[in-house]
């Protein structure tokens, strides 16, 4: 008497051996799996999408204090209640995300490399630079020191693209890129040819 059980193998040839075409497709699928698998470490090392800078842990309070010191050192004005800061070309600059503002407004110079430190002092925010297509997730507790070289003078909006609460849609910041040589702030319509 034969039992239907998974423990005892069935008698005889109960399965159809794979045909030639099926074998070929299995081999193709397997090779493709290996290609995709290899792409993961490859892109991690070679991919241009990786952030260009250093990353370090930072306490929210310490970062807020550092941003305040940066503002105290280089503030040149106020815009809609947000300090406007013009740091020396090539220096370390700071941008703080918080519910629901980006602080401060930055005035940077074209063609100079800055280290842009970004962090959040409360929840996750999304750094989205408009109209340039630069996107970065801002996580509290981490200082992202991004190496940036502005290459297009104009006014840029920093839009939060990570839902962060009731006034998420009002979280707008600003970065002004001055032409090389340090002329006055340029007035550029957003959406213009940047
Ligand atoms: Cu910050 Cu949405």
Image: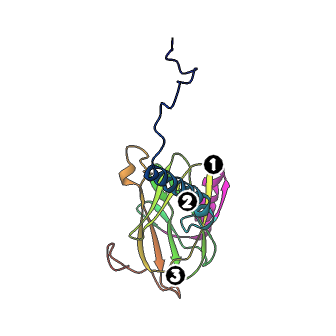
Q: Earlier in the sequence, mark 1 or mark 2?
A: 2
**In this orientation, does residue 33 appear?**
yes
Q: How many marks?
A: 3
- Residue 170 located left or right of residue 123: left
Judging by the rendered image, the residue that carries numbered circle 1 is 61
Judging by the rendered image, the residue that carries numbered circle 2 is 35
Q: Locate residue 191, reporting x and y percent.
A: 32, 73
Which disc, if any, is residue 170? none
Please say which color scheme the image uses: rainbow
The residues colored magenta run 54-77
Q: Earlier in the sequence, mark 3 or mark 2?
A: 2
Task: For mark 2, give the secondary structure.
Answer: helix
Judging by the rendered image, the residue that carries numbered circle 3 is 110
Between marks 3 and 1, how big is the CA–CA gap? 31 Å
Rendering quarter of residue 116: bottom right
Of helix, strand and loop, which mostly describes the magenta segment? helix
Q: Locate residue 166, reporting x and y percent.
A: 37, 43
Q: Nearer the viewer, mark 3 or mark 2?
A: 2
Q: Locate residue 7, reporting x and y percent.
A: 58, 20
**In this orientation, does residue 68 appear?**
no
Q: Are marks 3 and 2 in contact (CB under 8 Å)?
A: no
Task: For mark 3, give the secondary structure.
Answer: loop
- Outermost residue toward the front? 12
* Residue 57 in magenta stretch: yes
Question: CB of residue at label 2: within 8 Å of ligand 1?
Answer: no
Q: Earlier in the sequence, mark 3 or mark 1?
A: 1
Q: Label 3 neighbourhood size at 10 Å, few (<14), some (14-19), many (20+)?
A: many
Q: Which residue is drawn at 41% across and 74% down?
A: 155
Between marks 3 and 2, how big is the CA–CA gap? 41 Å
Between marks 1 and 2, how big is the CA–CA gap? 45 Å
Q: Nearer the viewer, mark 3 or mark 1?
A: 3
């Amino acid at each position: 008497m034969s039992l239907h059980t998974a423990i005892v193998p069935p008698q005889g040839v109960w399965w159809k051996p794979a045909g030639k075409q099926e074998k070929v497709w299995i081999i193709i699928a397997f090779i493709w799996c290996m290609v995709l698998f290899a792409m993961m470490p490859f892109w991690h090392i070679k991919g241009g999408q990786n952030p260009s800078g250093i990353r370090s842990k930072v306490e929210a309070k310490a970062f807020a204090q550092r941003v305040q010191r940066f503002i105290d050192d280089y503030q040149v004005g106020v815009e809609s209640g947000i300090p406007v800061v013009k740091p020396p070309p090539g220096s370390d600059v700071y941008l703080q995300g918080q519910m629901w503002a980006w602080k401060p407004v930055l005035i940077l110079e074209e063609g100079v490399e800055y280290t842009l430190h970004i962090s959040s002092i409360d929840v996750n925010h999304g750094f989205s630079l408009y109209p340039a297509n630069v996107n970065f997730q801002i996580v509290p507790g981490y200082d992202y020191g991004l190496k940036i070289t502005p290459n297009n003078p104009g006014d840029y909006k920093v839009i939060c693209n990570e839902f962060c609460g009731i006034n998420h849609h009002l979280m707008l910041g600003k970065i002004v890129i001055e032409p090389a040589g340090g002329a006055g702030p340029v007035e550029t319509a957003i959406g213009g040819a940047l």
